[in-house]
Amino acid sequence: MKKGICKIFLATALVAAITAPAKQALAQDKKTSGNPVVEGWYADPEAKIFNKQYWLYPTYSAKYNEQVFMDAFSSPDLVHWTKHPRVIDTSGVKWVRRALWAPAVTEKDGKYYIFFGANDIQNNNEKGGIGVAVADNPAGPFKDYLGKPLIDQIINKAQPIDQFVFKDDDGQYYMIYGGWGQCNIVKLKNDFTGVVPFEDGVTYRKITPEGYVEGPVMFKRKGKYYFMWSEGGWTGPDYRVAYAVGDTPFGPFKRIATILKQDASIATGAGHHSVINVPGTDEWYIVYHRRPLTETDGNHRVMCIDKMYFDKDGMIQPVKITNEGVTARKIK
């Protein structure tokens, strides 16, 4: 090696050795999550807690024909995130060709199941709908569970997308889903291979509240069922989240208020969310997507986290969207 080249090589190596620890220390010194919490165009985040780790599973926000995979992100504290690329893609689910959307993830009997919408079907003659894949750990790889969609029909005028899986206190799993302004709830079989009728013989029960567009979420707090959804157009600034409260998973649900929306000084199109409850506490976070103020591309959406609070009557207070995000919160 020539002396000049050798000196350049050694100098480069020395700079790398000096700067690498500094970059690592900078990352460790991060005080808040910041919003967005990760780099990249992502939407419709599903937030879960597995093995004392926070997990985010978003839609890859691109043109429909490019939406053929999903990444996941894990964190011990909501601030430092690790990317797990392509936890699911079309190589593992052969019938999916595009528009892989809005995952819902749950753990059951040591297996991890990811439910997803695919192919953006417009009628009952097209192949697609809501599918399910399975893996041995939260980072995948997830492989097709059924070899076909779990739900492949438009029923009660609800496009089969935006599924959310809810486990009730008695161990029963339900799936709430639907686009095009209509929402259904179904009772999942114990092995997730299909749906079963309710006691009255109805299989697809319509629970659409006023203002519903898409993106349903359900959780239980202090004996009440909170049902949340997105309103407005997903490419527009008025995309937002509203909610209702009921005594059962079936409602009836009467719209109460909007709790998440744009802030003209921070971002627009805040919606399609999920929620995190820190185990053993009454601490809550909302994870959602929004659009940067200067962005005109409808697909440019980013993942964000902010705190969510309840008042003394159990009503959800309006969420303040921030650029700072949240401070570190490890799970004990």
Image (cartoon, rainbow, N blue to C red):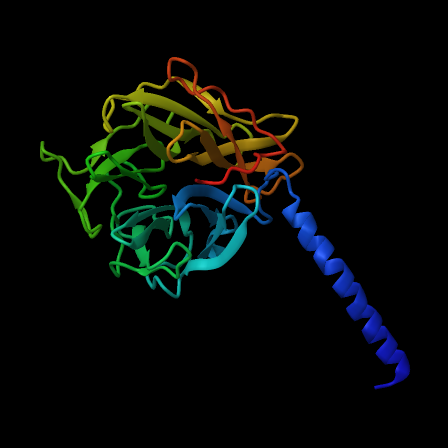
The residue lying at 19 percent from left, 35 percent from top is 170
In this view, 231 is above or below 14: above
Q: Which of the 4 quarters of the picture holds residue 197?
A: top left
Quarter residue 70 falls in: bottom left
Could you say where residue 327 lies in the image, as x and y percent from the top left?
A: 57, 35
Residue extending furthest toward the front: 332
Q: Position of residue 261 (x, y in %)?
A: 52, 26
Quarter the C terminus occupies: top left
20 w.r.t. 10: above or below: above
Relative side of 44 to 266, left or right: left
Q: Which sits in the foreground, 64 or 125? A: 64
**Image position of 37 (left or right of 254):** right
Which part of the image, by quadrant, shows the N terminus? bottom right
Q: Quadrant of residue 205?
A: top left
Residue reaching furthest to the left: 200
Query: Residue at the location (58% across, 37% down)?
Result: 291
Q: Is residue 20 left or right of residue 82?
A: right
Task: Determine if residue 306 is in view.
Answer: yes
Residue at 72% in and 60% down: 20
Q: Is residue 210 visible?
A: no
Q: Give the vertical position of 35 relative to 253 (above or below).
A: below
Residue 219 in percent (x, y) is at 33, 31
Report the number of numbered marks. Answer: 0
Whether residue 128 is situated above or below residue 220 in the rendered picture: below
**Residue closest to the far right:** 4
Q: Position of residue 108 (x, y in %)?
A: 26, 49
Q: Residue furthest bottom?
A: 1
Q: Nearer the viewer, residue 272 or 4?
A: 4
